[in-house]
Image (tube, rainbow, N blue to C red):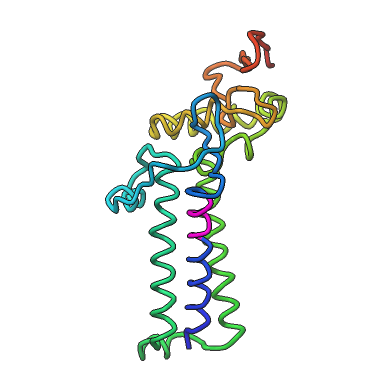
Amino acid sequence: MTTILGIHLILLGIGAFLLVLKALYFGGVYDTWAPGGGDVRKITNLTLNPSVIFGYLLKSPFGGEGDIIGGHVWLGSICILGGIWHILTKPFAWARRAFVWSGEAYLSYSLGALSVFGFIACCFVWFNNTAYPSEFYGPTGPEASQAQAFTFLVRDQRLGANVGSAQGPTGLGKYLMRSPTGRLFWGRNYAFLGSSRSLVRTSKGSQWFGLE
């Protein structure tokens, strides 16, 4: 009855291990915190300590790509073992009575799970600059300075500053961001605290820009 769930879990586990292999042996992954302003590198400091990996469920410790790739090792292992378990076993009697076992029901359960994943991804995009580097997902310089100015004044001045301060070093990337062109500027929370005018400095020169 849960064979299709087991197959999906095994495929997800294989996908997680493909990312691990890519990061360790086949070219590496992009590290936004690499010296010199971010670079693609192979991960050599893999984190497998369960207290560190599962500690992310309770708090937000400062970690790098080693934690992310190590987490995928744990995630891939859990998915594959769970998939095998679901293929070899049947649901308990109370579960068979509680759920509908049909193709349409499986589809609806899957869509519900995807919606949960979407909300989780939103949190990671907003908070985790390691998993979602600003170079790929952040705005360009003009977009950050002009289009988001009013948004910052209305919403992000208090919320963004509090969240960024609580994150410690991890939150720095929320404010100092690099655009796809390589320029360094105040990030998506736009930290010109207490003023509607900010100075933004680029990483390629010493010129300063006044942004209204």
Of the pair 127 and 78, the residue shown nearer to us: 78
In the image, residue 69 sits, relative to residue 166, either above or below, namely below
Q: Please tell me which residue lies in front, 51 or 198.
A: 51
In this rendering, position of residue 149 left or right of residue 76: right
**Compared with residue 156, is residue 83 higher up or lower down, i.e. above or below?**
below
Identity of the residue drawn at 55% across and 26% down: 37
Q: Which residues are magenta?
A: 16-22
- Residue 151 shown left or right of residue 29 in the figure: right
Where residue 31 appears, as percent x and y from the top left, is 52, 37
Please say if 96 is above or below 11: below
How many marks can you see? 0
Q: Position of residue 194 (x, y in %)?
A: 53, 17
Residue 35 part of the magenta-drawn span? no
Q: Position of residue 107 (x, y in %)?
A: 60, 78
Judged from this view, the residue extending furthest toward the front is: 25
Residue at 36% from the left image edge and 88% from the top image edge = 94
How would you classify the magenta stretch by its main secondary structure?
helix
**Where residue 18 sits in the image (x, y, percent)?**
53, 59
Q: Nearer the viewer, residue 54 or 194?
A: 54
- The one nearer the camera, 59 or 181, is 181
94 vs 200, left or right, is left
Residue positioned 31% across, 49% down in the render:
55
- Residue 19 included in the magenta stretch of the image: yes
Q: Quadrant of the C terminus?
A: top right
Q: What residue sits 57% from the left and 16% below the top?
A: 195
